[in-house]
Image (cartoon, rainbow, N blue to C red):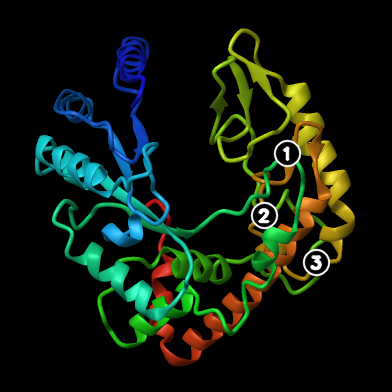
Amino acid sequence: MLNYGLIVEVVNYSKKVLENRVSFNLTSNLTVLNKQMAEFFAKNDFRIICSLDGDEQIHNENRILKNGTGSYERTMTGLKLLYQCYDEGQRKHIGVNSVITPPYSEERFERINKFFDELPYLDEQSPQSVSYEGRDVIAGDTCLSSNMDIVRFSDEERYDLVRWEYSKLSEKEKKLFSDMMDAGLKDIHNRRISDIPFVDSGLNACCVPGIQRLYVSVEGNFYACERIGNSPAIGNVKDGISLERVKKYYVDEYARMSKENCGRCWALQLCTVCYARCYDDGGLDMKRKKVLCEGCRNEMHKMLILYHTVLEEQPELLMKYNKDENE
């Protein structure tokens, strides 16, 4: 939103070229939002995700402004303004995303849940998601020491969010966030199953570069995803997407370098490791990928235990995963 004029230009151009075949989404901390912006976003039916981690103390632990003060008040002012400018039917398009940071504890999860449960600026249908803080795996100098807690994801000494989600489910209590548990259980419930070993596999959880996502840098270069960081470009605004570069770096090279490890992995059919955080400017970095692979296996081991616990204790809860995703 620091370059609001460019947003307006892009929206007007896109609607002129694509008419009603385009929709707009953005994620923001809303700290610079003003009434003019909010009215424009409402007029163009923007779907907006607000970065909000919890109450003032929790949010300000990491969301710091340049002057060193917390951003909570400005974020809440922006969220309230957005809510006021959207009509009742549009408010379901205002959502929040929270990043959960240590210490991970039942008390902390309860506190965050209570805050969002009482937050007045969200509709019942508003999207709400939560994730753990990222790790510095896209730094220029690959360093694994700061990423080892990914590998220790299933450590019983750490009270994780999925376990809390299931405890709330078992107690029939209202909880705001359930996407971590739902995503894991759904993947296992709808996993690929066969009476004989599979002789083939796709590129794990990787999407097709340039189809689902496309990141455009300020220099006009195309990248596979905004989450990857340093990685080989797949084209530019002048020449378009380069199928040759996509094939070289994100198909052939990825398959060749991953085949040995993936071929021995019991979690291959449940793998959630994608291109993100596995690359540097030169291409796939297997040292980084192996750390993520180990973390994925530990996570899948935990989710398999949870899935069969649900299957034994509350099997009816799994029925919702049978629904068609398009319903």
Which residue shows up at 18% across the image and 38% down it?
Answer: 82
Q: Where does label 2 land, which residue?
A: 273
Mark 2 nearby-residue class (10 Å; few <14, some 14–19, many ≥20): many
Nearer mark to the viewer, of 2 and 1? 1
State if disc 3 and disc 2 touch (CB < 8 Å). no
Would you say the residues marked 3 and 1 are in contact, meaning their CB atoms lie under 8 Å apart? no
Q: Which residue is mark 3?
A: 265
- Disc 2 secondary structure class: loop
Residue furthest front in the image: 67
Tell me residue 203's x, y (percent): 73, 48
Residue 93 to residue 314: above or below: above
Going 55% across and 35% down the picture, which residue do you hit? 226
Q: Is residue 210 left or right of residue 61?
A: right
- Give the answer, above or below, for where 114 lies relative to 82: below
Q: Quadrant of residue 31?
A: top left
**Quarter containing the N terminus:** top left
167 or 68: which is nearer to us? 68
Q: Which residue is mark 1?
A: 140
- Residue 163 image position (x, y, % from top left): 47, 80
Q: Secondary structure at mark 3?
A: loop
Tell me where residue 193 appears, x and y as whole percent. Answer: 67, 69
Marks 2 and 3 sit apart, C-alpha to C-alpha, by 12 Å
Q: Is residue 174 above or below residue 126?
A: below
For disc 1, the neighbor class at 10 Å (few under 14, some 14 to 19, many from 20) is few
Amino acid type of the residue that numbered disc 1 sits on in the rendered structure: Gly
Residues at discs 2 and 1 in contact (Cβ within 8 Å): no
> Residue 220, which numbered label?
none
Q: Quadrant of the C terminus?
A: bottom left
Q: Secondary structure at mark 1?
A: loop
Amino acid identity at mark 2: Val
Q: Considering only order in the chain, which callout, 1 or 3, is on the residue closer to the N terminus? A: 1
Return the disc, 2 or 3, that comes first in the chain's sequence: 3
